[in-house]
Every structure is written in C-alpha cells, then in structure tokens.
Image (cartoon, rainbow, N blue to C red):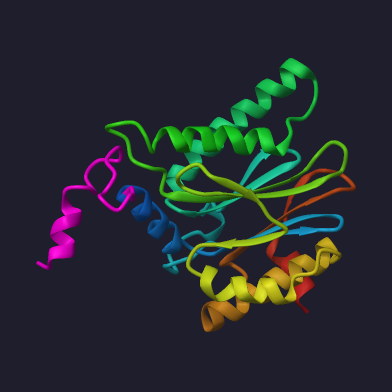
Amino acid sequence: MNKQMVDKMGYDRSITMFSPDGRLLQVEYAKKTVKQGSTAIGLACKDGVVLVADKRVTSKLLVAEAIEKMFKIDDHIAVTAAGIISDARVLVDRAQLKAQQHSVTYDSKIDVLSIVKDMCDLKQICTQSAGLRPFGVSLLVAGVEEDGIIKLFLTEPYGLYFQYQAAVIGEGESEIEPILQKKYKPNMSVDDGIKFGLGLMKDFLKAEFNFDRVDVVTVRASNKRYTKLTNDEIKGLMK
C-alpha cells in the first residue's frame, strides 16, 4: 500500500473530517459516483426546456418503462438525475411535497429556484453532519416560471447549484459537454432541442442506443406542462 493511500485512509471515513490538504474525501467520492451514473442532458430553449436521459437498460428482461429517470415535481417543473437514483427519489419526494404545500398555501405555483434551494439545503446538511453521507446524485431541475421565464439548474452532491443554458451530467459529461459548448444555440426551439439532445445521446451511446433506452421530457412556455414523450413521438422527431 503506497504512502498516499495510507495518508487518505484516516480522512475518508467521516464526512466531517478535512484531510490535511483541505479536502472532504467523502464529497469527492460522491462526485465520482455521479460520473459513473447514466447520462442526462438538459437544454433551455427559446420556448421551453428539454430533458433527455439514458435509462441504461441492462437486461432484456427489464421493463424499460418501469425505470425512473424523469420526475415530475409540479406541472411546470421536471427533474432528471445521474448517480444513485434512490437518493434522487428522496429529494424528489421532498420537493413534490414542498410544491404541493406552496400551492395550497399561496394558491400559486412554486418558483424553480425555491425547489433547487430546498434540495441543496438538505444536500449541504449531509456534508457537515456526523453519521450521514453525501447524496450520491446530481440533479438537473428544469421548468418554466409563471411569468414565462425558462430555468435550468444543476445541483451538485454537496449542495452547490448553478443555473445553465445547457448541461450534461453522468458518464457522458466529458464527451458531450464540449459539443454542447460548440453547438448549443439559445434560440433553438423545443422540437429542435429534442432532436439535438437525442442526437448527442445517440452519438455517445453509439450501437447501444435505442428508443427504449431514452426518456424525453419537455415543459413548454406555452402551456407550462410537464410532458413525457412516447417512443412513437421520439421516433417521429428523429426521422
């Protein structure tokens, strides 16, 4: 066992302990977990948002439709994830409850940023509390506000969040992000965004790509409605 591994061993067993070089190793491990997760892409378009996710169907015996990679927080907010999806469900359940409580209390739709901040508050607590571990998941939170403003946020496992025009998480990040930076156009329509996102996923997955393996969700500014595309609709747009 080399000296570097020995030096790290005492510092990666507690989330509350910094290593001598100022790192929280448990947080870094959580980030590596996300990079091993299946790919998810988010695009903010001129008339709505698009989420495209790889469900990574690993067996012909699996029912592809039963694999959850897209989540509806409210009519106007959609979420997808990369990493430990069971961790994502805990955050999604909490966010759904917060959205319902806001709707009942204020008779209005909750804003996307409030959902993101609530998720990240819980994530951050799990980086400073003994006996816990970080959430091993990153989320793309996309939606359309009541005033029509289009939002896309990325949340990190340790509780930080950023607003993006286009983002990718999961195993395809290093390959797809440079293409997003070159080819993404803010003025593309939702339909163009679907084609663009599916094209990126197809190029990444190559021979493993098929329509049962991907999920596509949109929220359009015109109706502010979470809409999950069927396989037939996806195939029609890819022609």
User: Main structural element of the magenta stretch: helix, strand or loop?
Assistant: loop
Q: Is residue 166 above or below residue 106?
A: below
Residue extending farthest to the left is 1
Give me the residue at 16% from left, 56% from top. Answer: 7
Q: Position of residue 26 (x, y in %)?
A: 32, 48
Q: Is residue 63 above or below residue 157?
A: below
What's drawn in magenta, residue-wise?
Answer: 1-24
Q: Position of residue 1 (x, y in %)?
A: 9, 67
Residue extending farthest to the top is 105
Give me the residue at 68% from left, 37% from top. Answer: 113
Q: Quadrant of residue 201?
A: bottom right
Q: Is residue 63 above or below residue 181?
A: above
Q: Is residue 53 visible?
A: no
Give the side of residue 165 with respect to residue 61, left or right: right
Q: Position of residue 86 (x, y in %)?
A: 43, 45
Give the side of residue 188 with respect to residue 122, left or right: right
